[in-house]
Image (cartoon, grey):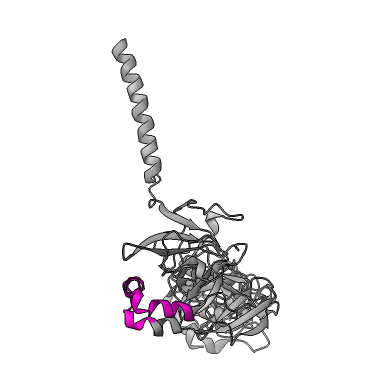
Amino acid sequence: MTLRAFMQRAGKRIACFLVFVLTLSGCDGQTPLTVVKAVAAGVPSLAPFFDENSGLGRDAQVRSRAAHGGLQQGDTPGLYGGSKQPTICDVERLEQFLTDPGNDQKARAWARALEISKNEIPDYLDRLTPVLLRHDTLVKNHDYKKGKAVPYDSLLQAGIAILVDRQGQPAVKCSCGNPLRPFEGDTSRISVEFEDGNEKWQGYERSQVVAVRPAPRALERIALVDVREPERGINRPVGTTGEDDSTFDTRQRRAVPKLAGATFGQASRQLADSGLAAGYEGKGRPPDGARVTASDPPAGSELRFGEYVTLSVAGGESGGGGPGGTSAGTSAGTSSGASSGASSGTSAGTSAGTSAGSAAPPSPPGSSGASTTPTPSSSGPGVSPSAPSSGTSSGSGSPGSGKPSSADPPSSSPPSSSADTAGPSSRPPGSAPPSTSPPPPPPPPPDPPTSSPPEVSSSPPASDPVTSSARPPAGAPVTSEPASSEPVTSAPAGSESAGATT
């Protein structure tokens, strides 16, 4: 009994220990958590490159804003803020410090962290632009310890003054001069440590932090929002510190452009040029080459500066959360409707129904049925093969184009006018001909071979219904139905070829 009790106690301890270890290592199968050090606005660094008390930069008190997606590009309108006091970062003083021969070792470590040479420091600083963070932002920060730049992941609080490069990427923390590089971890898998005087700030939400990716193009100006007066926008030329700023009204409405059919990268640039931000659903940002199928709000909607437009893509990684989903089928369903402002929930079946409703009416009785016989579609009902997956690039297959839709089933019901002109279409073979046809000659001729069709030249006058003057052979189908009321495949091989020639 003593041994059994000992084993039970030991088993419980081992189980508790395993639960603890699995919890720390991420037992849910996802990537392990990345430890991130919090850096609050106004709190000095413990190992700065530059003396914090020298007035190199000044942070502001800004409430962090929620972003639509953990990854943001450097050209996103409204990503950064500014103020009427342009001297939030003294770039000239930082350059003087780093080019001082007495700070040669520190300058070399600073340049090495940014992957430039020491001689390139002046030109590099001339291309940087001071801004204020409007979001709690993840970066790879650097301390200066023992003559080297020591990297570590950190979360910079909104309101911290930084310098960004020509692609909108954070490059320098102004107050201490520490170099900054892109955060390389998963923004949704972080563990933030609040220590060394950096207490958890009001409004902090781990799910709302962002990391910035370089814009795919060099920027000429950066569109900022005044952190004190949000209705005031600031256009700041890249490489200037505020002396050449121009202002605009952020309340002015901007129309969402037509984005269906463009790639995600193209759509993001179009939105940025319009003063709007590209949003997406899911954990990962879709690849630039993913095809946009719809936007929410749709094209033509009017938004304020910096508001988000959620893009749904086909073949991307956005997780299928947005309207219309992200599968390849969504691309087919929204190719004709999304560009005209249709909602992203349009399905392929709706597209096919619209095409069927706009098809031409059936031909009148007596016309040839060969040209209007629908061709069965190999893609199944509800999918228009003529609709390109890229949206509206060609415009084929759109409603109102005049082309018959391949989504119409081959055996559609006959139009209501057929019963008035040619009698019931369901008359069995061998039954008496319609009462409107002329009577057969007194001695009926012997039945012709089944392979020869009735002569088309013996038809009655045009005022009578189109029927054969000879008695139809036994077992032969009635061919007097109006065009397109029955598929041509219901007739024997011989009569089908004759109907095509008429």
Residue 261 is situated, as x and y percent measured from the top left of the image, at 50, 78
Q: Is 246 above or below relative to 20?
A: below
Front position in the image: 352 or 448: 352
Q: Residue furthest top?
A: 1
Q: Position of 102 compared to 162: left or right?
A: left
Front position in the image: 105 or 282: 105
Q: Residue furthest left?
A: 3
Q: Is residue 380 visible?
A: no
Residue 160 is situated, as x and y percent measured from the top left of the image, at 54, 66
Residue 4 is situated, as x and y percent measured from the top left of the image, at 31, 14
Q: Is 301 above or below relative to 160?
A: below
**Membership of 94 in magenta stretch:** yes
Q: Residue furthest front?
A: 102
Q: Quadrant of residue 468?
A: bottom right
Q: Position of 300 compared to 9: left or right?
A: right
Front position in the image: 371 or 162: 162
Front position in the image: 498 or 332: 332
The magenta-colored residue range is 92-121
**Membership of 194 in magenta stretch:** no
Q: Is residue 313 visible?
A: yes
Magenta region, mostly helix, strand or loop? helix
Q: Quadrant of the N terminus?
A: top left
Residue 63 is situated, as x and y percent measured from the top left of the image, at 62, 62
- Count of marks overlaid on the render: 0
